[in-house]
């Protein structure tokens, strides 16, 4: 935007040479930006499926910052809901003695949130461990061993329902698999390391493919396919969708809506019948006494409620 005015009256303006006694100013219009404080050296971010909270990993002060996107949405361990909340990963760690009274970690990097927003997995790259954060309280509830240079995490679908976290280790010949809720009941106390995979790439090992370089090294990131996150799971081919459960297919829904829809007895189906269900057939909701039904909408790839004749 160009305007003729006095230089002193306009902030963030650039004065150009005067012509015929008039000063011509170029005014730079900068949009307002929200720049909330994060912490020491922010390196990675994630966001909840419902879009209400963002999380930032701060490498050098060993914290995770929860930021509300709009209304206050960050829970605290004492039951409050705040606009901003800081998770101190050193809470149970004594910096003088090195002793600990609970799960802790140093220098967090990647911190993905499970597609159902129930828990977060965070790597502590200096401590070589994986931490689990309960999303209902923003509290670190578990710690698992990982290895030197523990770095990348991403979620994939678990056969039969739920999620698995896949973790890469930069300086070790292994990748770990974390099951944050083995029986899918929302209780994280039984979370565990489900297994690991050797990444040496030697011919004596059974591999899905043949590594071409960097033998014996880990990685900085992980991609699990099929992609189970909102915006991606909806675009999966039907052959992959048919292998996912109802809850795994409904990533765009809130947890309460997903539970309501997928707990319907008529939607508890076997693999062989699921492929037929997603072709557009009507699925009756037995709790509604015939007044409501579900239909899988092909255009949006989502189940929709619809009225039906009694």
Image (cartoon, rainbow, N blue to C red):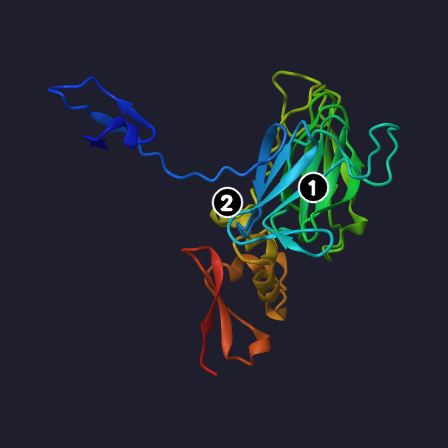
Q: Which residue is painted at 28% across and 32% down in the image?
A: 9
Placement of 227 over or under 271, stated as above or below: above
- The relative height of residue 47 versus residue 216 in the rendered view (above or below) is below
Q: Which residue is mark 1?
A: 87
Q: Nearer the viewer, residue 58 or 51?
A: 58
Which label is found at residue 304?
none
Residue 56 in picture, x, y percent from top left: 60, 37
Give the residue at x 82% y 34%.
Answer: 93
Label 2 to label 1: alpha-carbon separation: 29 Å
Q: Position of residue 39 (x, y in %)?
A: 62, 33
Question: Is residue 214 left or right of 281 when viewed as pictured?
Answer: right
Q: Earlier in the sequence, mark 2 or mark 1?
A: 1
Crowding at mark 1 (Cα within 10 Å: few <14, some 14-19, many 20+): some
Mark number displayed over residue 232? 2
Left or right: residue 116 compared with residue 188: left
Please, what secondary structure does the residue beneath circle 1 have? strand
């Amino acid at each position: 935007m160009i305007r003729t005015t006095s230089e002193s009256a306009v902030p963030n303006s650039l004065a150009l040479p005067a012509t015929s006694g008039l000063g011509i100013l170029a005014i730079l219009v900068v949009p307002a930006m929200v720049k909330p404080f994060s912490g020491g050296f922010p390196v990675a971010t994630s966001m909840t499926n419902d879009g209400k909270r963002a999380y930032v990993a701060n490498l050098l002060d060993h914290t995770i910052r929860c930021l509300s996107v709009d209304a206050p949405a960050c829970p605290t361990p004492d039951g409050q809901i705040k606009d901003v909340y800081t998770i101190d990963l050193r809470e149970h760690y004594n910096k003088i003695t090195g002793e600990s009274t609970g799960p802790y970690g140093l220098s967090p990097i990647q911190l993905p949130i499970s597609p159902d927003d129930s828990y977060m997995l965070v790597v502590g790259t200096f401590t070589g461990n994986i931490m689990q954060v309960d999303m209902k309280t923003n509290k670190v509830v578990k710690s698992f061993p990982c290895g030197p240079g523990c770095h990348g995490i991403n979620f994939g679908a678990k056969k039969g329902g739920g999620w698995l976290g896949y973790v890469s280790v930069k300086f070790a010949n292994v990748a770990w698999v974390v099951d944050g809720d083995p029986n899918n009941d929302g209780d994280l106390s039984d979370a565990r390391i489900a297994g690991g995979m050797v990444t040496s790439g030697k011919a004596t090992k059974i591999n899905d493919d043949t590594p071409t370089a960097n033998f014996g090294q880990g990685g900085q990131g992980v991609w699990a396919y099929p992609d189970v996150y909102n915006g991606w799971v909806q675009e999966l081919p039907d052959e992959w969708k048919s292998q996912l459960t109802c809850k795994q297919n409904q990533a765009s829904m809130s947890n309460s809506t997903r539970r309501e829809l997928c707990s319907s007895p008529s939607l508890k189906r076997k693999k062989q019948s699921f492929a037929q269900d997603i072709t557009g057939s009507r699925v009756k909701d037995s709790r509604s006494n015939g007044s409501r039904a579900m239909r899988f909408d092909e255009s949006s790839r989502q189940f929709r409620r619809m009225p039906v004749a009694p």
